[in-house]
Amino acid sequence: MPKVTKIDQLGPAAREFQKAIAASAGEHFVLRLYVSGLSARSRQAIDNIKSLCETHLVGRYELQIIDIYQQPELAKAQQLIAAPTLIKKLPLPLRKLVGDMQDSARVLIMLGVHAKGAGVAP
């Protein structure tokens, strides 16, 4: 009888999610973080997203930090209602996340990135 792995025990949606994560391993990410000046919350969001990118997307990301006070037209064009807001432009689909990016699991799920060291072992 063949050995059943943890991946085999997952449901079809979870298996598809695992395949999508594996496929995204070489993709380049284009991210925009909209912040409101140099407030504590904006600084926290910048530090958190930079740390996550350097840990999980090394060499595969472009991060633009946009101050909505200095460039309000960009925030208006994106129809932002709060800051800080992270927008994942690429790879598609486009996603938006509002907050200080402190919940790394939530940010990684939004990005479609598998956390290092949290994989499903065979």
Image: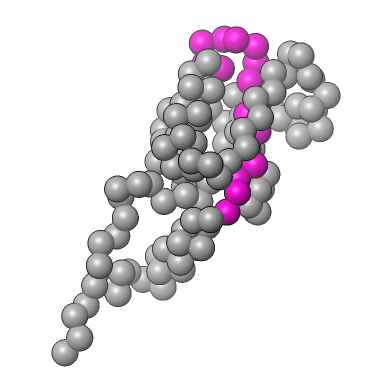
Q: Is residue 115 magenta?
A: no
Region of the chain picked out in magenta, as a range: 27-42
Pick the residue in front: 84 or 30: 30
Asked which quadrant contains residue 75, the reply is top right
Q: Position of residue 2 (x, y in %)?
A: 20, 86
Pick the residue in front: 110 or 63: 63
Residue at image coords 40%, 41%: 105
Residue at image coords 76%, 14%: 70
Residue farthest to the bottom, as pictured: 1
Residue at image coords 65%, 25%: 65
Asked which quadrant contains residue 82, the reply is top right
Answer above or below: position of 33 versus 110: above
Quadrant position of the C terminus in the picture: bottom left
Q: Is residue 44 left or right of residue 33?
A: left
Quadrant position of the N terminus in the picture: bottom left
Pick the residue in front: 106 or 111: 111
Answer above or below: position of 112 versus 105: below
Q: Position of residue 54 (x, y in %)?
A: 46, 34
In this rendering, does residue 17 appear at all? no
Q: Colour scheme in the image?
A: one colour
Residue farthest to the front, as pictured: 59
Q: Position of residue 89 (x, y in %)?
A: 68, 44
Q: Is residue 29 magenta?
A: yes
Q: How many marks?
A: 0
Q: Is residue 94 left or right of residue 76?
A: left
In this rendering, does residue 70 appear at all? yes
Q: Position of residue 63 (x, y in %)?
A: 62, 33
Residue at image coords 49%, 36%: 53
Asked which quadrant contains residue 13, the reply is bottom left
Q: Is residue 33 left or right of residue 10?
A: right
Residue farthest to the left, as pictured: 1
